Amino acid sequence: MVDLGIAFARVAFIMGFVLNLGGLLTWVERKQSAVMQDRVGANRASILGFRLFGLFHPLADALKMLTKEDFMPARADRVLFLVAPVASVFFALSGFATIPFGDVLQVGGREISLQAVELNAGVLYVFAMLSMGVYGVVLAGWASANNFALLGGQRAAALMISAEVAIGASIMGVCMVYGSLDLQEIARGQGAYWGGVIPKWGLLTQPLGFVLFLTAGIATTKRAPFDFPEGESEIIGYNVEYSGMKFGMFLMADFVETVVVAGMTTALFLGGWQVPWLFRDGFHLPGGLLIGLPHLVVVLLQVGAFVTKVVAMVWFLMLIRWTLPRFRYDQAMRLGWLGLLPLAVLNIVLTAAVLLL
């Protein structure tokens, strides 16, 4: 029962963090774009006269989607039409399960790893979940009995396949440097230092891999500048026949995938939960100075560092989303197969050569 309670607590933390952050991103996207474009942004929804900078807009959106007419095309495949949005959200949420948000929590002589699911091949699990997300998109396009929706589904499948191949190749260098497919071990490996001063984060050991992974990761979220599967300024998206909360689930899946990509970037390239010079007993500063800290404080600092890095990466992804114009379909395919993939293979070769030398 104790182990079951611990597992439930870890899953609850991850689910709460991802779902709440994903929901908050509907507000962040409006406000961040407004700041970048010198506008006020969402600020009209209020409760008892209080607006709170537009924070009630996500609540208003949820109420609107729950009360809107639930439309289904007459010729649609009813089962697949209903399964598609559920599959998209499920696989997006499942992708965060193996991403560690801290090292270990010591309680009653036991060490509890701070990740929802402990897997030796956690990297492969995350990619499997992100790859399975394409089924929800393809099913939505097929089941809608709409040629434009089918076109959007085909575009999404092509984009996500090319992006997943590039992602898999781009992180091989990280796995080679830290010698593991376990995300927890990779995070711990980034706690080493050059000369006791510079942390060996993936951003410094694999700078090319970081750029390639981030680019391909943005493509997997199907958001600008890779949003041609949905075509938000056109009416061609795979979700064009969806309304109400089913449409909201596709929207939520995109935001959750953004959080997952930010979490993976943090775990692989930004040190994960690592805080510079912070170890299990406190801060070991350069020069031999030790600042001892209670174990619980160390754990809270690690979790806080992970959350801060994820939030910062989400902000950066939003920045890109509102800065770059949309790629054409052929440009995105050319970037994936003739740009990202060859560079990722080159990065693997260079990493192997450096490790051998």
Image (cartoon, rainbow, N blue to C red):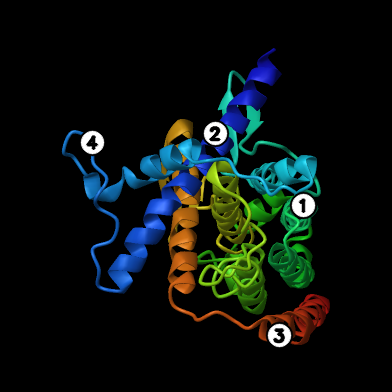
User: Given the image, on which type of amino acid does mark 2 rest?
Assistant: Phe
Q: Which mark lies nearer to you, 3 or 1?
A: 1
State the SS at label 1: helix
Q: Which of 47/283 is in front?
A: 47
Q: Residue at x 23, y 41 (%)?
A: 46
Q: Amino acid at mark 4?
A: Ile
**Left or right of 123: which side holds 85?**
left
Residue at x 64%, y 29% (from the top left corner): 111
Q: Position of residue 189 (x, y in %)?
A: 66, 56
Q: CA distance from mark 2 to mark 3?
A: 41 Å
* Residue topped by disc 2: 13
Q: Residues within 10 Å of mark 1 (few under 14, many from 20)?
A: many
Type of amino acid under label 3: Asp
The mark nearer the N terminus, 3 or 4, is 4
Q: Earlier in the sequence, mark 2 or mark 3?
A: 2
Q: Residue at x 76, y 56 (%)?
A: 145
Q: Which mark is residue 47?
A: 4
C-alpha gap between disc 4 and disc 2: 28 Å
On the rendered structure, is 8 left or right of 23? right
